[in-house]
Image (spheres, grey):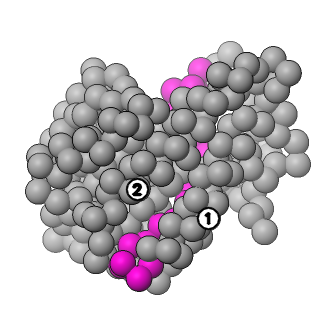
């Protein structure tokens, strides 16, 4: 039995990709998971895999950009599981592309689904996380690329989330709550589709990664989250961890 056994995590965007990988890695350590996302069928598929790992998992269909609904979501999760120990803010539904081609509404969506949603969820979770809880917010190495072309809106929203994470880490440390960011590269459905559609560009991207491979959502990203929320890294808070095979430099 691990040190995380019996704890409860709320993971957003957990119906596929990195969010699902994080949920699976946590479940391997005996963590029960509130699986949150917009598409119920995907959430239920994730829950089926989690149940096979002998943990409790429930699907909660919710658009995190609807920040007014998030306190009620947290109340429902706590009522269902009886506690909440870990919050992972992974969901993002913003736009990509050149800034001149982007509408104000598209630019705004990234902020609504990233820093605004995380802000609302972290505040709602605060009373339940006090005394040993942990928050992991997903950001991106696009924040520090020398050329963020087509990723500008994404990088801007995630930069705001990174700053918010640092503030939460400092302000809530006396409450026994840790908060860290991770900036992952992992094989997601969207990245897989891009790889198939543009194999030459994808090969050049992989070549820019010192480890020469894209991360696995569970083995590379999820396992790192397990370490972050566990006791062995209990003195780490306010950090941004690049999980990208050495591609980015966070100075």
Residue 9: quarter of image = bottom left
The disc label shown at residue 122, or none: 2
Marks 1 and 2 close (CB-CB < 8 Å): no
Image quadrant containing the N terminus: bottom left
Instruction: Determine the residue positioned at 33% across, 30% down.
Output: 62
* Residue neighbourhood size for the residue with mark 2, other residues' Cα within 10 Å, grouped as few (<14), some (14–19), many (≥20): many
Residue 45 shown left or right of residue 166 in the figure: left
Nearer to me, 123 or 183: 123
Which of the marked residues, 1 or 2, is nearer the chain's N terminus? 2
Residue 113 position (above or below residue 81): above
Q: Residue 64: which quarter of the image? A: top left
Who's the residue at 18% across and 39% down the image? Answer: 58
Q: What element carries label 1?
A: strand
**Where 164 falls versus 70 (above or below)?**
below
Q: Which residue is drawn at 73% across and 19% down?
A: 103
Q: Distance between the residues labelled 1 and 2?
A: 17 Å
Say whether residue 72 is visible: yes
Q: Which of the two marks, 1 or 2, is nearer to us in this view?
A: 2
Category of crowding for the residue at label 1, using alpha-carbon neighbours closer than 10 angstroms: few (below 14), some (14–19), many (at least 20): many
Query: Residue 221, position in %: x, y?
Result: 49, 53
Give coordinates of residue 113: x percent, y percent: 52, 36
Q: Give the range drawn in magenta.
A: 173-195
Q: Mark 1 points at which residue?
A: 240
Quick check: 210 left or right of 57?
right
Q: Work out which residue is located at the far front of the displayed protein and give it.
A: 68
The residue lying toward the viewer, choosing from 141 and 96, is: 96
Q: Where is residue 5 in the image (x, y as percent from the top left)?
A: 19, 66
With respect to residue 125, does 58 lie above or below?
above
Reply yes or no: does residue 144 show up in magenta.
no
Res 203 visible? no
């Amino acid at each position: 039995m691990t040190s995380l056994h019996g704890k409860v995590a709320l993971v957003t965007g957990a119906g596929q990709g990195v969010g699902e990988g994080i949920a699976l890695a946590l479940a391997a350590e005996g963590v029960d998971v509130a699986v949150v996302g917009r598409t119920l069928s995907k959430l239920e598929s994730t829950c089926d895999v989690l149940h096979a790992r002998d943990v409790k998992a429930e699907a909660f269909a919710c658009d995190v950009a609807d920040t007014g609904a998030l306190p009620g979501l947290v109340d429902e999760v706590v009522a269902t599981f009886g506690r909440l120990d870990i919050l992972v803010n992974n969901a993002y539904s913003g736009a990509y592309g050149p800034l001149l081609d982007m509408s104000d509404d598209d630019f705004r969506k990234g902020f609504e689904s990233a820093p605004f949603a995380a802000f609302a969820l972290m505040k709602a979770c605060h009373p339940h996380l006090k005394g040993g809880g942990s928050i992991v917010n997903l950001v991106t190495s696009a924040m520090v690329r020398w050329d963020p072309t087509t990723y500008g809106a994404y990088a801007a929203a995630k930069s705001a989330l990174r700053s918010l994470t640092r503030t939460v880490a400092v302000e809530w440390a006396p409450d026994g709550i840790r908060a860290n960011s991770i900036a992952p590269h992992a094989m997601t459905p969207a990245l897989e589709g891009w790889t198939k559609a543009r194999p030459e560009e994808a090969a050049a991207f992989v070549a820019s990664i010192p480890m020469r491979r894209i991360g696995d959502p569970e083995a590379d990203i999820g396992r790192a989250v397990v370490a972050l929320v566990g006791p062995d890294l209990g003195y780490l808070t306010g950090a941004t961890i690049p999980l990208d095979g050495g591609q980015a430099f966070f100075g």
